[in-house]
Amino acid sequence: MQQQAQTVRNQLQQAGVANKDLAPIDDVVKALGAMSNEKNLQNPTGLNELYSTAVQKFKALEFEIRKRVDTTNGQLFLSGSEDVPPSFKSLIEEYYRALAKKGGK
């Protein structure tokens, strides 16, 4: 996967994308590279954290790409995500209960 991300980075660079704009994909490449480190492969907890970091970096990259591509009349259209940090789930549920009590107003 790291090699594929590096290939995409190289293609973007060849297409004329500025180095400063390649920083998010560099973060993804770096995070994926850390996952393949022999030391990290022997530590399941650390590997899980590295995986989470890689996923977050990829999401940030996707968001950056969407900002540049999916704009129409100054509006940004994002797809919804069901990924919610566990610490926020109870707050979101409470929010929806409060809305339901108010009749959704």
Image: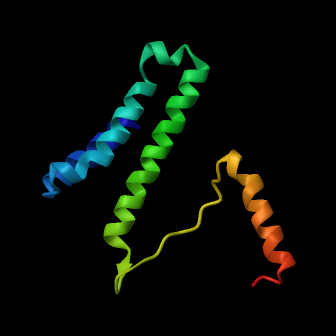
Above or below for 40 versus 65: above
Which residue is at 50% across, 43% downward?
55
Q: In the rendering, at what x and y percent does residue 81 appear?
A: 60, 61
In the figure, residue 94 lies in which quadrant?
Answer: bottom right
| Quadrant of the image containing the N terminus | top left
Above or below for 105 versus 85: below
In this view, the residue in front, 85 or 46, is: 85
Left or right placement of residue 7 versus residue 37 in this view? left
In the figure, residue 66 lies in which quadrant?
Answer: bottom left
Q: In the rendering, at what x and y percent does residue 25 appear?
A: 32, 46
**Which colour scheme appears in the figure?**
rainbow
| Quadrant of the image containing the C terminus | bottom right
Left or right placement of residue 96 versus residue 13 in this view? right
In the figure, residue 27 lies in which quadrant?
Answer: top left
Above or below for 62 versus 104: above
Q: In the rendering, at what x and y percent does residue 40 appear?
A: 48, 18
Which residue is at 77% across, 53% downward?
90
Q: In the rendering, at what x and y percent does residue 103 appear?
A: 83, 84
